[in-house]
Image (cartoon, grey):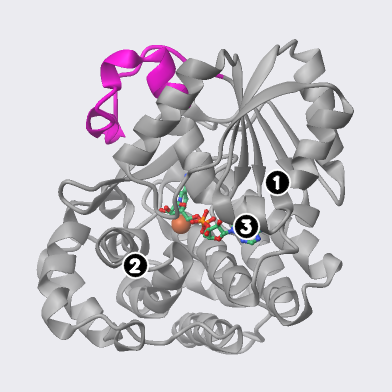
Amino acid sequence: MSRFILNETSYFGIGIRTELATEMKTRKYKKALLVSDKVLTECGVLSKVKKVLDDNNIVYSEFLDAKQNPTIKNCHDGIEAFKSSGADCIIAVGGGSVIDVAKAIGIVINNPEFHDIKSLEGVAPTHTKSVPIIALPTTCGTAAEVTINYVIIDESVNRKMVCVDPKDIPLVAIVDPELMTSMPNALIAATGMDALTHAIEGYITKGAHPISDMFELKSINLIAKHLRGAVKDKNMIDLEAMSIAQYVAGMGFSNVGLGIVHSMAHPLGAIFDIPHGVANAILLPNVMEFNMSSSIDKYAEIACAMGEYIRDISKEEAAKIAVEAVRKLSKDVGIPQSLKDINIKESDLPRLAKDALKDVCTGGNPKDVNENDILEIYKKTY
Ligand SMILES: NC(=O)c1ccc[n+]([C@@H]2O[C@H](COP(=O)([O-])OP(=O)(O)OC[C@H]3O[C@@H](n4cnc5c(N)ncnc54)[C@H](O)[C@@H]3O)[C@@H](O)[C@H]2O)c1
Ligand SMILES: [Fe+2]
């Protein structure tokens, strides 16, 4: 049994954000709450979207206070902004953090008994679809515009909660690479490696399906071809390919799950505010080594999708080549290679392992794990 949920409508291409006006009009929305953040306001990304709204006389209020690695308090502020706006839809312009805040707002407005947000962790019994969301991603990583997940920090315990709810999926995704050109190179690298992690974890997860496999392999292939160029000089060919690659990875993993790279990255974001993509990228090769015996055939396919030459060698050798290809890509785009490099202390590792084991993504890992396995991988990555 498998279920696939995707956006009602999605758009791709340079300058395609003008379709935002078409969608607002044909769906007969009267007023939007525009959700974004301060950085996007300052670097001019938001004004590119506001121009479309202003040119078409579309009415909107603003909530521009979404935080990187958003908290419950942050979502509550957004919910209040929605209530006082009189809006009937949400336009989210940002990375995963902004889109996740938009999802939490949309779900709580229509399911007010979940106002504490904590009760939304995992798969919550919400009854009504989110307020309609139109999402315009500005990073090339999370695919939050097409996923049924959102990730919020419970700041009372410094833990990331993964909320999984088919009712939160944005109705419309507008993937315009021109909204990504202002990303600093390190952000392109980090979010691109997040997308690669989605594609690889989604490909080998316990719930993988031939349909999601198709998306994940294509995504791996696009990222291997285009991430280096996108990071090096932000040329539009590579950036556009990355904007599609991250979305395609999301079409897959959102429907089948992830694994312990994400479980182990989440506490690094929640406790130390490490950018999500950096945390994933540091952990990915060592987790791949740990999971290798469960997915040898698929690892050989990953090597092939990454453009590695694997004819006339054993599957075991091809699997090792896949791990090394991922490690090389991560190094080439300038990702730090150890937990020490991002100032984590060895004494922090046991706490991280405890939190990671409890994460919603752990159940999807292809190989069963215990706390000690996770601790050993953290130590190896230290
Ligand atoms: N919903 C999902 O399915 C899903 C999947 C994976 C991760 N996540 C979550 O998403 C969050 C990470 O999202 P992210 O990696 O996209 O980064 P982000 O949204 O946290 O953004 C990181 C920083 O980059 C800035 N930024 C974003 N776009 C920019 C641009 N075009 N130009 C300049 N600066 C820009 C932001 O303002 C922010 O300061 C984490 O909280 C993670 O847990 C969600
Ligand atoms: Fe992710």
Q: Is residue 126 part of the magenta span, yes or no? A: yes
82 or 291, which lies in front?
82
Q: Secondary structure at mark 3?
A: loop
Left or right of 346, for residue 43: right
Q: Is mark 3 within 8 Å of ligand 1?
A: yes
Give the magenta-colored segment's residue range.
Answer: 106-131
From the image, tell me which residue sits under label 2. 294
**The N terminus appears in which quarter of the rendering?**
top left
From the image, tell me which residue sits under label 3. 139
Residue type (three-letter) at the residue carrying disc 1 = Leu
Q: Secondary structure at mark 1?
A: helix
Above/below status of 349 relative to 152: below
94 or 285, which lies in front?
94
Left or right of 214, for residue 51: right
Sequence-wise, which precedes: disc 2 or disc 1? 1
Rendered location of residue 302, percent (x, y)? 56, 71
> What separation in Å lies between label 3 and label 2 (alpha carbons)?
32 Å
Residue type (three-letter) at the residue carrying disc 2 = Ser
From the image, tell me which residue sits under label 1. 46
Local crowd size for mark 1, using a 10 Å CA cut-off: few (<14), some (14–19), many (≥20): many
| Residue at x 29% of width, y 65% of height | 264
2 or 283, which lies in front?
283
Sequence-wise, which precedes: disc 1 or disc 3? 1
Left or right of 257, for residue 171: right
Above/below status of 325 relative to 41: below
| Residue at x 76% of width, y 20% of height | 24
Rendered location of residue 85, percent (x, y)? 55, 18
| Residue at x 44% of width, y 31% of height | 78
Local crowd size for mark 2, using a 10 Å CA cut-off: few (<14), some (14–19), many (≥20): some
